Amino acid sequence: MNLSEQISSLFSCNVNPSEKPQLEISVSKREPLNIAVPMTIFYSIIFFFGVTLNGVSLLTLLMDAQMRVSAIRFYLISLIISDILQLLTLPVTLYRYYWESYPWRLGRTVCKVYFMVRQVYCATTSWVIMTFTTERYAAICHTMWSVSSLKKFRLPCLLSVWVISLVSAVPFALVYDQALACILDYTAATRADAFHVSTMCEMTEPDPAHIYKGALLVRAGIFFLVPLVSICILYLLILLYLMQNGRQRRNMGLTRLDPEGRRDIQCHQNGKLLLNEKRALKLMGAVLVAFFVCNFPDIASSLMQVYVVVWSDTVLSVYTILKSYLSLPLWYINGALDPLLFCISSHTFRRACCRTLGRIRSHCYWRFGSMSWLRQRTSSEEASSTAIKKNSGKWFRKNMAKKRNTISDHTNHKIGNSHESPFQEEQQQPN
């Protein structure tokens, strides 16, 4: 008895034959608040920092003069674009897994695109790293090959990677869809509340699900195991070549030991090239380790879906841990981690990011600072005009008071003269 038959034997929904559900699923409508709220905060932090860091990295690769001539520029741009696409699916993940698993309210298109983007991210990241490692192997171990010929194949190879990734995502668009499901809510308190008929975004291909299982095997084999083995072999060959080349350089006197005991390559064109190649390999090696560690739980759970026939309690617990508790968090952490790895592994990229942030800060200061200066100027003009009005009012009132005082004094003088006695007038007359 397979898994679908086991679920069917547990429950069934009483519906009209015309409304017969395509799926029978046991799931809760939403996670408890003590799980949903912390996970929402956790994923929101990842989303904010991931999109911000990847955005700054993309601007650095597009704007900085030193990074525009870098050999790994297009590889890093491809990785950043795939990371941003993958991070943009995070709100849908929060909605689907933690807040409302049914009914599905986002439509059929979002359901299909959601699972396609996840496959595109896995495929592009692994194959971009493998393409870069292959080019570095050719540039280091086969120096007779023209560097210009390697540059000619760089963009066609990256475009081919993206085309292959999009084609590999088509099977997921075929098997995932919005469908009517008979749902057993195992968190319900009563039997009447336990059974629901609602829409869900799930895999709708009936058993034995050849397309779905084939797509999972392609993801695990071609887009995970094959790149992993190929990259490890290429890195091993590069390290062996560098060790052999280092011994030859020491014998020829092209290297010396500095006071701290590290090998220092003298001023030599080939030596400088090897030093730059080592730095590039260090950067992409960190990205490689992060990608395969963070994607292993998802690949392992996918292989369990294909090959496990009897789901015992132990197997189901391992699958739940890999799929629910490790796969999703590590999936998004990897997308937000790549820009940090770029900065940690490469001081050139770190300095370029600092220059980009300086330009952004100066631009924002020039834009918003000028606006604040304008606001300050406007407020100062308003204050000065208000002061002028107040002063003019005071001057007007003062002048009016002076005029009133002059008029009153003149009137009082006339009145005083009219009240003088005839005896005083006679005294004023000459004798």
Image: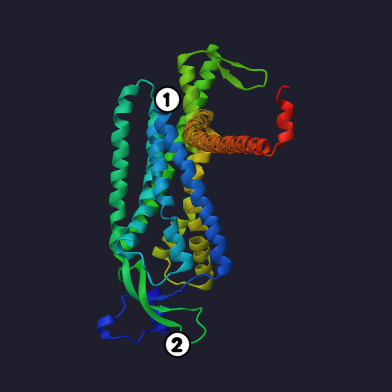
Residue most extreme to the left: 18
Query: Looking at the image, which residue is at 37% across and 34% down?
Result: 74
Which percent across, then down, holds residue 415? 65, 39
Q: Residue 179: in sight, yes or no?
A: yes
Q: How many marks?
A: 2
Task: Decide: is 101 above or below 286.
Answer: below
The crowding category of the residue bearing disc 2, from other C-alpha atoms within 10 Å (few below 14, some 14 to 19, many at least 20), is few
Query: Looking at the image, which residue is at 52% across and 16% down?
Result: 249
Callout 1 touching callout 2 (CB < 8 Å) = no
- From the image, which quarter does the C terminus lie in? top right
Q: Earlier in the sequence, mark 1 or mark 2?
A: 1
Which percent across, then down, holds residue 351? 52, 28
The crowding category of the residue bearing disc 1, from other C-alpha atoms within 10 Å (few below 14, some 14 to 19, many at least 20), is few
- From the image, which quarter does the N terminus lie in? bottom left
Query: Looking at the image, which residue is at 46% across and 15% down?
Result: 269
Which percent across, then down, holds residue 81? 39, 43
Q: Name the secondary structure under disc 2.
A: loop
> Label 1, on which residue?
65
- Asked where in the image residue 91 lies, by quadrant, the reply is bottom left
Q: Check disc 2 and give the amino acid type.
A: Ala
| Front residue (pair 372, 61) | 372
Q: Check disc 1 and give the amino acid type.
A: Ala
